[in-house]
Amino acid sequence: MQTLDQTVVDAPTARPALPRRSPIATDALSRWRAPLSILALLALPFLLPSQALAVNVLIYGLYAVGYNLLYGYTGLLSFGHAAFFGTGAYVTGIAIGTYGLHPLAAMALAVVVASGLALALGALSIRSRGIYFAMVTLALAQLVYYVALQASTWTGGENGLRGFTVTTIDLGIVSLDILNPLTKYLFVLAFVGAALALISRILASPFGAVIEAIRENETRARACGFDVERTKLLAFVLSGLFCGLAGALSAIHLSIVPLDSLAYHTSGTAVVMTLVGGAGTFFGPFVGALTVLVLEDVLSLWTPHWQLALGSVFILFVLFMPRGLWGTALARLTAFRGRA
Amino acid sequence: MNPIANPILEVENLGRRFGAFTALEGVSAAFGEGRITAIIGPNGAGKSTFFNLLSGALKPTSGRLRFSGRDMTRVPQARFAHLGIARSYQITNVFPRLTAHENVRTALQARVSRYDFWSRRDARTDLAVRADDILESVGLAGRRDRPAAALAHGEQRALEIGIALAADPRLLLLDEPTAGMGPEETKEMVALLRRLGESRTILLVEHKMKMILGLSERILVLHHGRLIADGTPAEIQADREVRRVYLGQSGGYGHA
């Protein structure tokens, strides 16, 4: 028996009986990414100066995570994701304000409508590539913006949608007091956490491997036998779904839907937050959302031209830290472990 | 050429135009199972166009393409891999940031799971094991966990063949498998192709004449988008027309 073991160990080409897991998969940080992210977000309201900022980090973080699914993991640069965020917000507001729907039902409807819109806009844009894809998504999102501007009896037009204040959410057994900042934070976190668990699952699935393959090499993916267009469309819809949920949460949070939530700079916000945090990383978009929101707060206190300063910071990131804050931190950690 | 009884691949009057430019015209040939056939021709002869038509990347503007009796002329490219035709590219075409193992595993997955976003991908241990077998067969077992971008050029070419093999193809189309390789790497690749040729039908485009003459049983010569010769290496070497347009034209190719 001993000799047999010896041979196996000594043979230079000996193959392990079971396939070894890739080093990335064994990485605890990656394996427990969803629970760890939720834990980090649980601590957030106690670390930040204001609860409102913490809720915004959650909402915009989810928005960027949804965007990242398309940009960071599938490799499609969209400039039109405000359409899904804004639609999610408007549908929630209208469903509560005009039709008196239960907030949860309104949010569910919002997610369905945002996904349907993503299916339509995706079907129209997915065949164009690169910068053309970005331009087509931008144009389609602008279309949605102008529809909301014109349909002012429904949307309130330029003034935004008002008059649907949510103060309590009746869950049957308990009634949540949304005016309590911590309760509101935990309510939003419940949805964000569920979304993160779902996205983590999607990324770990066979489908997750397909979108990565398309990002890495579309031609090769097609030659392997993947239907690239269908896969991209599915990724687009999933991305729109999570952005729509983020929009729905923002409507509940603000009790108003500004027309700006459909504007092109809201689309830009998703791009900036994803890139600053780290495209193609799981937690990066939250880091990006936190960074951008804090910078916005701080810079707007100092100067009315804060957008100029924020733009400069963004350019610096693209030039000197293309992996973003979280992406760079992860790369350093991996390199450090490699040496150890 | 003797007519082939049960051809795996048949092209009939195949042609492709790009606007006013005719890249390929009137190519007819049949290919039997389990052989290595080489396609040669000077630059711009239409070899790449021919390959793109055979792999479904381009659709023909005239003629027909039949694979084991089935008309493939209108079949979308993504279906080709499932039906048993796989290819490698002239310019290395892998998934750069995925490891060698993930490259092959993902290619294997194309046959069994394309839209499943609920199960765990590492639950399919059968794919992982099969990917290891393929890496072994192309000599990359030792590079399993390296990102493809970090592999040497010759290794990337071998990985590309590994990805093509994942489709378990009956027909393997290889576009210049030894492009950019040194003599040592070329030798290893030839040995690999010979092993693969024992169980599969291989069509390859190559520039290295010496290698082709030793490896393939049959050679097709394209010139200006037309098939000008089709025969055994000995017949091709003796063909006047071929010598005129191709073999004699440069010292680089003429060592045969």
Image (cartoon, coloured by chain):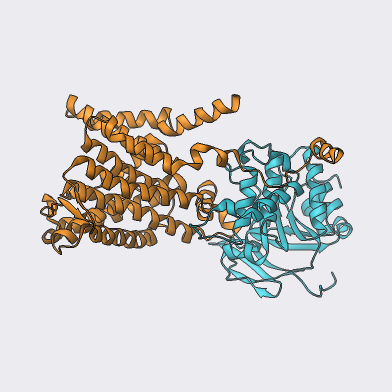
Chain colours: A orange, B cyan
At x 30%, y 56%, the residue is A140
Quarter-of-image position of residue A113: bottom left
On the rendered structure, is B4 left or right of A211?
right
Q: Position of residue A218 (x, y in %)?
A: 53, 52
State the residue in front, A44 or B248.
Answer: A44
Instruction: Give the quadrant of the N terminus of chain A.
Output: top right
Q: Position of residue B130 (x, y in %)?
A: 69, 53
Q: Position of residue B57 (x, y in %)?
A: 59, 60
Quarter-of-image position of residue B75: bottom right
Q: Position of residue A282 (x, y in %)?
A: 43, 41
Q: On screen, B164 above or below B67?
A: above
On the rendered structure, is A148 left or right of B41?
left
For the image, the number of numbered tags is 0
On the rendered structure, is A269 left or right of B54?
left
On the rendered structure, is B33 left or right of A279?
right
In this rendering, does residue B24 appear at all? yes
Instruction: Give the quadrant of the C terminus of chain A.
Output: top right
In this rendering, does residue B97 appear at all? no
Quarter-of-image position of residue B28: bottom right
At x 69%, y 50%, the residue is B162
State the residue in front, A197 or A304.
Answer: A197
State the residue in front, A285 or A48.
Answer: A48
Q: On screen, B115 above or below B62?
A: above
